[in-house]
Image (cartoon, coloured by chain):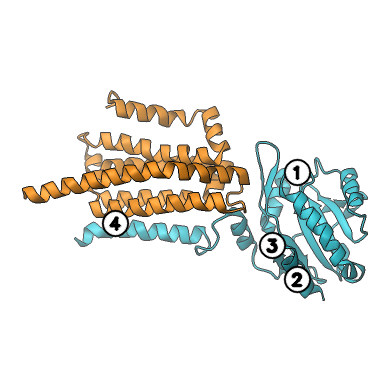
Chain colours: A cyan, B orange
Amino acid sequence: MKRSILLPLTIFFVWIGVILWWTGGFRHFTSYSYAMYRAGTPPRNMPDLKMVDYDQKNIDFNRWKGKYILVDFMYLHCSSVCGILRSRLYDYQKELAPYLKKNLVMVSVSFDPQRDTTTILKETWRSLGAEPNWIFASLKGTNEEIINEMYKFGIVIIKTPEGDFNHTTMHYLINPDGKLIKVIDPSSGKDKTLHEITKWIQ
Amino acid sequence: MIKNPWVTFSLFFLLATFIPNVHKLLNSEMYLKMLVQIPAYSILSFIIGLKLRSLNNKVILQISKHGSSALIFLFGSQTFWMIPRSLDLSVYNEAFAILLPLNLIGAGFLFGIAFKSAPFVLKTAFSIYGLAMFLAMGIIYINFNSLICAVFSIEMQHLAGKYILYVFPFVFVLFLYRLFYNMSKLTEEIIIQ
C-alpha cells in the first residue's frame, strides 16, 4: 500500500514544486509579471540604456540626474495600446506642468529604432505640444539586443509575425539619484496614476 | 499495431501537427493553440498508448501498473502548459517549442498505457477539476481586458475564450456520459460480486 502511493505522491509534489518555482511562488503566471519579478522590486538600479533623442544626440538617464524621470517604453507604429498611453501622457503633461518646470522630466523611449527614426520622434513630439521636458528618444541596438536588455529591466517585448510588438505597458519613475523607485500601472486610471506619480515627486 | 485504425488516425494527425506550415498555423492563433494543438498532443498520444497497452512488452506491462502516477504526471504537464508564461515561451522560444510536444505526448502516451490501472475516483476527481479549470479559462479570457499571453493579441484572447465556452458544453456532456457509463459498470460489478 505504502509503495503504491509513494510514486504518485512524489510526482504530485514534484509538479507542485516545479510550478511553485516557475511562477515565483504562485504569484507570477504571465510573462509580464514574471519579468518584473525577476528584475527585482524597486528601489533598484536602472540599466545603462543608450539612447538617441529626437535631436540625434546620444543620451542616457544620467543626463537628468537631480530630477525625477517618468519613463515609458513604446513604439510609434503600435496599432493598439501605445497611442492610448501617449494621449494619457499628454493629459498628464498638463497636470504635471508645475513639476515639469521644476524637478520632473518625461521620457518616452522607443524600442523600435529601425522604424522610429529621430525625424518621426521629433514630429510626434511637436504634435504633442513640443513640451521641452518631455523627451522622445529611441534605444540603440538591434531588435534582439534591445529585447534582451529590456527583459533584464523587467520589460517583455515580443515581436509578432505581423511585425508589431506585444510589450509591457508600465510607467517607470526614477528618483534624482538615478534609482527606479516605482513601477506604475497606467490601467489603474488617470487619477490614480497621477496620484502615484505626484506623491513621490512633491 | 499500426494497422489499428485508431493508432493510424492518431499517428497521422499527431505527425501532421509537426508539418512546418501546420505548426506555424497552430501557433498563430490562441484558440488553435489551446483547443487544437495542446489537446491533440495529449489526446492522440493517449489513444496510441491505450492501443499499445495490449502489446506483450515488459516495459509496457511495468508502466501499465502505474495509473495514478501517469494520471498525475499528465495533469501536472497540462497545468504547466496552461500557465500563460509557459504558453508564451512555447511560441517564441525554440527549446520550449520542442519541450511542449515532448512533454504532452509523453504524458498522454504513458497515461494511455496505464489508464486502466488508474483508480476511478482519481480519474473522476481530476476530470472535474480539469473541467472547472477549462471553464474558468474561457471566462477569464473572454472577460479580461489585459493581455494574459504576451504572444497573442487581446482580440485573439477574447476569441479563444469565446471558443472555449462553445466547446465546454460538449466536453461536459462527454464527461457526464463517461461518468455515468463507468458508474453503471461499477454498479454491475458490485452486484455480480
Q: Can you tell which mark lies on residue A195?
A: 2
Q: Earlier in the sequence, mark 3 or mark 2?
A: 3
Give how far across and how far down residue A171 sits, in percent: 74, 61
Q: CA distance from mark 1 to mark 4?
A: 49 Å
Q: Amino acid at mark 4?
A: Leu
Q: Chain of mark 2?
A: A
- Please tell me whether mark 2 sits on a helix, a strand or a loop: helix
Chain of the residue that carries numbered disc 4 in the rendered image: A
Label 2 with label 4: CB-CB less than 8 Å: no
Q: Position of residue A114 (x, y in %)?
A: 80, 41
Q: CA distance from mark 1 to mark 3?
A: 27 Å
Write down the residue under mark 4: A7
Identify the mark nearer the N-term, 1 or 2: 1
Q: Nearer the viewer, mark 2 or mark 4?
A: 2
Q: CA distance from mark 3 to mark 2?
A: 12 Å
x 71%, y 53%: residue: A149
Indicate which disc, 3 or 4, sits on the residue closer to the N terminus. 4
**Where residue A142 is drawn, which disc sits there?**
1
Label 3: which residue?
A: A185
Q: In the rendered structure, which amino acid carries the disc numbered 2?
A: His
Give the side of residue B74 with respect to residue B164, left or right: left
